[in-house]
Amino acid sequence: MRVFTAVLYREEDIYVAECPEVGTVSQGRTVEKAVANLKEATELYLEEFPLESGRRPIITTFEVAVGAGA
């Protein structure tokens, strides 16, 4: 078992879910459904393209000035 990250965005009437470690994307009408669909998509992807042992991306945050003079 391995833990992955889900990043979700709301787009009109659906949620889009993305797994940054693998690059898989899915969607659903609820957060729970979007994550469940992402889990399924990621499992299917990893069956075809297993991750290299010990390979973990670095995930961090950064700040951007919004609306700063242009």
Image (cartoon, rainbow, N blue to C red):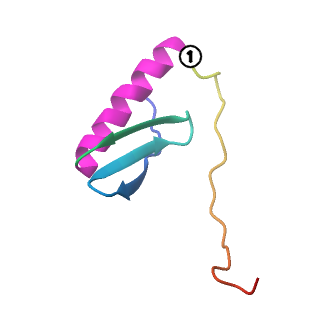
The reply, left or right, for residue 23 in relation to residue 56 is left
The reply, left or right, for residue 44 in relation to residue 59 is left
- x 64%, y 22%: residue: 53
The reply, left or right, for residue 42 in relation to residue 66 is left
Q: Quadrant of the C terminus?
A: bottom right
Magenta span includes 35 = yes
The reply, left or right, for residue 51 in relation to residue 32 is right
Where is residue 5? Give x, y as percent. 47, 45
Q: Residue furthest bottom?
A: 69
Up-down relation of residue 22 to residue 5 (above or below): above
Up-down relation of residue 26 to residue 15 (above or below): above
- x 66%, y 30%: residue: 55
- x 62%, y 63%: residue: 61
Up-down relation of residue 10 to residue 49 (above or below): below
Tell me the quarter of the picture where residue 41 sits: top left
Up-down relation of residue 45 to residue 22 (above or below): above
Where is residue 39? Give x, y as percent. 36, 32
Q: Quadrant of the N terminus?
A: top left
Q: Nearer the viewer, residue 14 or 23?
A: 14
Query: Residue tagged by mark 1?
Result: 49
Q: Main secondary structure of the magenta part?
A: helix
Magenta span includes 39 = yes
Residue type of the residue flagged with mark 1:
Phe
Magenta stretch bounds: 30-48
| Callout 1 secondary element | loop
Count of all numbered marks drawn on residues in the image: 1
Where is residue 30? Give x, y as percent. 23, 50
